[in-house]
Image (cartoon, grey):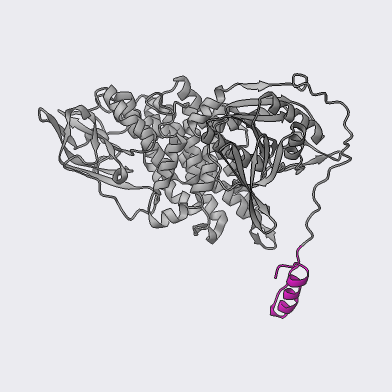
């Protein structure tokens, strides 16, 4: 018998706008998260591991690289991809990060910019979850400013030689392959590095207080020798990594709502059952105000995410649309987590409740994939036509 | 081998049931799902299909909304989807006649269903259909296997479990099965969406649903639980132990 199905907060019935196929995919992922993720997530966090069975299950469900078509990829809509992210992140942001990186940051660049041979070699095994990918763009000294990256590639005639280091790489240590962005003759290019390539290592970064059930790594290239057919032929410059990031950020705008819903659910249940001064704290105006604010922000976020999904599916979108949704929905999710913690009082810090875990996760989500502030600057440039990323020319 | 699985859509276990004018108000049910015992019958049917290379026919009768459940069945592997559109039928014998006619129409060798539906808990569909088509019927089945032209089933007996072997046309009514239910995957969902649902009316099946002798007078929610009793302080331990032993019968 299955666990009681989760009934999500959906005040404006936004999910009724989904297609039947999208709802079926939602229910499949939702049930799996209820049965296999939520009962195990706190232990995974305490131990600081990403359970390998989750990789297998995501592959079996066939949700990795959700919106990509052909090469044994799922071929779902972008809206369905968003829904999948939301359901996964209701479990944990680390789980959603795993799927975002695999689909949007590792599979997508091969699918869009790779050669036919590269697509045939990598995509079917990545869609099935047999091969995990990671994405190397950020460096220790270059985060918001990836254009000044140091990692470089040299053409040695019959191979490329990579030198440099990447940091904050989700899935790095467990990946079979890395999409690495490096400068070749001063131009940013994408390379596929396989885990056994000589001169490549991916040590895990330990000691995180956030995304504890996700593997975060450094990628180190010391005279790393890779064959000539591992360069992504289809893109040059920052457009390559930014195309990937647009898709991942889109998924995050949905995913954050999953965390927010988990925090709202817990806060509501707690407020209804916690008795103070002889009455449930949910009967007090200050608590009701907090809950109604959560409902308001989640509902707005849901409409934003759904409409952006429709725009992604019709192709009628600009990166600024994604910046706004990622920034807003992560921002409200983090604030909802904090307010939920407040409602839970001391209990909110225990891992008996999901609150503190979501809150700590969302602190990372707020500054990865374009920090909150950088997204503001992207919108500022859109409004004024004046870039404010750098001072002067 | 044609394997028919009889499915019923019932209010989800999480759905609130409200009563209006002495009747369950079906319009107020927020979510409908496949009846849980039927899920085990479907899983067993899929395993039989895989073992024998058979064809799995999922059959339901009910209003338009029940088609969604057939698509769900297709997502995990049902080959043929059959919907018998009926509205508001409460008489089990009517449902049995319709289902019996459908399984005969599809030349089924074996029929699987849940032991009872999660809403009405009637428990009559399996035995009733078996009676109408002249099939053997085994109830409370948790497992079924097929080899050498015979079905071997596992069911409880008064001293443990028993194995019942059947050959020929058979109906198996499932209890909670021993296998884990499979999940759909994206590929299954996308194929299911394209799978046509065959609608066969009672007229097409040659079943006349005339008068019913069954009248449901009224339906009511279960009685509210009486308020609990609260004891504070060590001096009540003896009294609580006695109550737990004599009234609650838990120790």
Side of B91 relative to A364 (left or right): right
In this image, B1 relative to B103: left or right? left
What residue sits 73% from the left and 79% below the top? B238
The answer, for residue A18, to whether it is visible in the render is no
* B235 in the magenta segment: yes
- Examine the rendering and report whether any part of residue B3 can be seen: yes
Count of all numbered marks drawn on residues in the image? 0
Residue located at (32% from left, 47% from top): A216
Q: Residue at x 79, y 24 (%)?
A: B207
What x and y, as percent, mark residue A16? 61, 30
Quarter of the rendering occupied by the C terminus of chain A: top left
Image location (x, y in percent) of residue B247: 78, 68
Q: Which residues are magenta?
A: B228-251
Q: Nearer the viewer, residue A263 or B200?
A: B200
Q: Which quadrant would residue A9 be assigned to in this image?
A: top right
Q: Could you tell me which residue is drawn at 88 percent across and 28 percent down?
A: B211
Percent x, y for residue A78? Answer: 46, 27
């Amino acid at each position: 018998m299955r666990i009681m199905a989760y009934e999500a907060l959906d005040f404006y019935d936004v999910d009724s706008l989904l297609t039947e196929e999208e709802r079926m995919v939602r229910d499949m992922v939702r049930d799996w998260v209820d049965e296999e993720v939520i009962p195990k997530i706190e232990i995974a966090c305490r131990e600081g591991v990403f359970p390998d069975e989750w990789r297998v299950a995501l592959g079996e469900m066939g949700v990795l690289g959700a919106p990509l078509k052909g090469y044994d990829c799922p071929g779902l809509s972008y809206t369905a991809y968003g829904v999948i992210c939301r359901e996964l992140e209701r479990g944990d942001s680390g789980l959603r990060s795993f799927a975002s990186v695999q689909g949007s940051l590792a599979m997508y660049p091969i699918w869009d910019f790779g050669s036919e041979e590269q697509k045939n070699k990598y995509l079917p095994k990545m869609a099935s979850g047999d091969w995990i990918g990671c994405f190397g763009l950020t460096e220790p000294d270059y985060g918001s400013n990836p254009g000044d990256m140091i990692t470089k590639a040299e053409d040695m005639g019959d191979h490329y030689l990579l030198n440099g280091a990447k940091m904050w790489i989700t899935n790095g240590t467990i990946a079979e392959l890395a999409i690495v962005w490096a400068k070749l003759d001063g131009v940013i290019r994408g390379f596929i590095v396989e885990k056994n390539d000589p001169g490549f290592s991916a040590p895990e970064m330990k000691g995180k207080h956030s995304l504890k059930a996700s593997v975060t790594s450094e990628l180190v290239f010391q005279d790393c020798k890779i064959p000539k057919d591992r360069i992504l032929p289809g893109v040059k410059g920052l457009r390559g990594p930014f195309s990937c990031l647009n898709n991942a950020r889109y998924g995050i705008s949905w995913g954050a709502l999953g965390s927010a819903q988990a925090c709202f659910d817990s806060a509501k249940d707690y407020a209804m059952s916690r008795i103070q001064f002889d009455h449930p704290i949910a009967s007090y105006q200050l608590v009701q105000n907090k809950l109604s604010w959560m409902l308001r922000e989640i509902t707005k976020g849901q409409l934003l995410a759904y409409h952006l999904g429709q725009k992604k599916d019709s192709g009628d979108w600009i990166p600024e649309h994604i910046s706004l949704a990622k920034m807003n929905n992560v921002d409200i999710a983090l604030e909802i987590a904090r307010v939920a913690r407040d409602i839970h009082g001391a209990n909110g810090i225990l891992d008996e409740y999901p609150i503190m875990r979501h809150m700590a996760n969302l602190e990372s989500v707020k500054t990865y994939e374009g920090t909150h502030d950088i997204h503001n600057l992207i919108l500022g440039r859109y409004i004024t036509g004046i870039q404010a990323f750098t001072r002067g020319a | 081998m044609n394997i028919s699985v009889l499915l019923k859509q019932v209010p989800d276990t999480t759905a609130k049931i409200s009563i209006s004018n002495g009747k369950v108000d079906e319009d107020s049910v927020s979510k409908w799902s496949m009846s849980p015992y039927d899920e085990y019958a479907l899983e067993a049917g899929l395993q039989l299909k895989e073992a024998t290379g058979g064809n799995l026919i999922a059959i339901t009768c009910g209003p338009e909304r029940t088609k969604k459940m057939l698509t769900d069945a297709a997502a995990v592997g049902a080959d043929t989807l059959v919907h018998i559109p009926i509205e508001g039928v409460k008489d089990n014998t009517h449902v049995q006649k319709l289902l019996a006619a459908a399984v005969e129409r599809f030349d089924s060798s074996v029929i699987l269903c849940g032991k009872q539906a999660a809403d009405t808990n009637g428990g009559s569909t399996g035995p009733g259909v078996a009676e109408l088509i002249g099939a053997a019927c085994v109830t409370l089945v948790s497992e079924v296997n097929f080899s050498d032209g015979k079905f071997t089933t596992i069911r409880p007996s008064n001293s443990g479990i028993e194995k019942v072997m059947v050959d020929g046309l058979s109906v198996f009514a499932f209890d909670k099965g021993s296998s884990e239910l499979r999940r759909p995957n994206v590929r299954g969902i996308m194929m299911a969406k394209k799978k046509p649902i065959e609608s066969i009316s009672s007229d097409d099946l040659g079943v006349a649903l005339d008068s019913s002798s069954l009248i449901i007078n009224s339906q009511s929610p279960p009685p509210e639980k009486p308020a609990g009793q609260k004891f504070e302080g060590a001096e009540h331990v003896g009294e609580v132990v006695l109550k737990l032993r004599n009234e609650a019968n838990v120790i």
